[in-house]
Image (cartoon, rainbow, N blue to C red):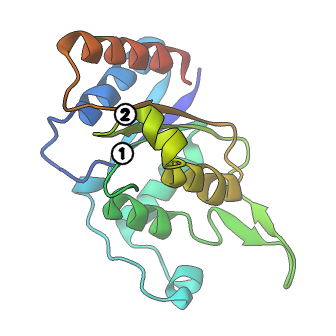
Amino acid sequence: MKKIVIIQGHPDPEGGHLGHALVRRYREAAESAGHEVRELVIASMDFPLLRTQEDFNEGTPPGVIADAQQDIAWADHLLIAYPLWLGDMPAILKGFLEQTLRPGFATSKVQKGSLWEKCLSGKSARIIVTMGMPALAYRWFYGAHSLRSLKRNILGFCGVRPVRSTLFGMVEEASDQKRSKWLQEMGRLGGDAL
């Protein structure tokens, strides 16, 4: 059985969006399959944005971020879910990742002038992105740059792999039947801890 941390990156603390329902279904299926699950709801966390390289490299993470780091360190698998906003992840999720994946936790210098050690090696991840545009257009016409950046430049740099992704497009126009199919897919992924 796997230890899973869900990072709910939707900025609306009230919930009620498709992204919340998808994450809820994943969690229910994962727990039913015997996996241990913890959830970090970014919209409910209070933390400042990083403003200097010195703070990023040397600063002490706020308590809520230190707690999130402990959860991520505990996990075998991460599920990161967010809506596409202006072609990217919402600012609150990016701010959370900057605060959390600091040197000393997610990476560390082996020695001065050398390459970085990837401190989160051995963990896998799945990224869930909901969007108003067709997922195919995001992936092929727009190049899925935020998804590629999260996979390669953030998670990959920290050693998380494999990183898989699932995109849900045209969510505002999706029929009840389509949404039901998406929830079934999330149930399958959660049960398999993928």
Q: Quadrant of residue 177?
A: top left
Closer to the camera in the image, 120 or 14: 14
Q: Does residue 138 appear in the picture of this structure?
A: yes
What residue would you read off at disc 1? Answer: 82
Locate residue 44 relative to residue 185 in the image: left or right: left
Residue at the (39%, 23%) spot, across then down: 26
Image: 188 above or below 62 = above
Q: Secondary structure at mark 1?
A: strand
10 Å crowding of disc 2: few (<14), some (14-19), many (20+): some
What residue would you read off at disc 2? Answer: 134
Image: 171 above or below 61 = above
Residue 185: x %, y % from top left? 42, 15
The residue mark sitting in front, 2 or 1, is 2
Residue 87: x %, y % from top left? 39, 55
Quadrant in which the C terminus appears: top right
Q: Does residue 34 appear in the picture of this structure?
A: no
Q: Quadrant of residue 192?
A: top right
Which comes before the other along the chain, label 2 or label 1? 1
10 Å crowding of disc 1: few (<14), some (14-19), many (20+): many
Residue at the (32%, 39%) spot, across then down: 133
Residue at the (35%, 18%) spot, across then down: 182
